[in-house]
Image (cartoon, rainbow, N blue to C red):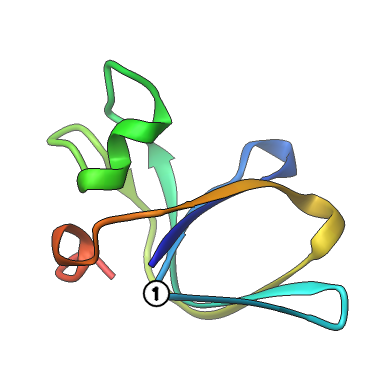
Amino acid sequence: MKIVVLTNGFVLVCRTYTITDGHIHMTNVRCVRAWGTIEGLGQLATGPRVDTKLDAMIPVVAAPLHSLVFNFDIVESAWTSHI
């Protein structure tokens, strides 16, 4: 599981993440509408906070690779019930 940050401020949490054909392919994706953190985005690595707001699930998302800003792994057990 990963948090993926794209250009234009999109922050996504996803179950799987692969790069092929110049695109990022993600499954079980939810957009993080509000982080709800007090110590920045990295705080979400250990799970969503009380004030974290997630959009509805999108089964599959593909984004052009040039839109990737950065990504990081998240604790699967802390996110499983959310994605």
Residue 41 found in image quarter: top left
**Residue type, label 1:** Arg
* Residue 3 seen in the figure: yes
From what the image shows, is residue 44 above or below residue 79?
above
Residue 38 found in image quarter: top left
Residue position for label 1: 15
Seen from the viewer's position, the closer of residues 52 and 45 is 45
Residue at the (14%, 66%) spot, across then down: 77
Residue 39 found in image quarter: top left
- Looking at the picture, how far across and down is residue 56, in whole percent? 37, 65
From what the image shows, is residue 10 above or below residue 39?
below
From what the image shows, is residue 67 above or below residue 60?
above
Q: Quadrant of the N terminus?
A: bottom left
Dot 1 crowding, Cα within 10 Å, few <14, some 14–19, many 20+: some
In terms of secondary structure, where does tag 1 sit?
A: loop
From what the image shows, is residue 37 above or below residue 6?
above
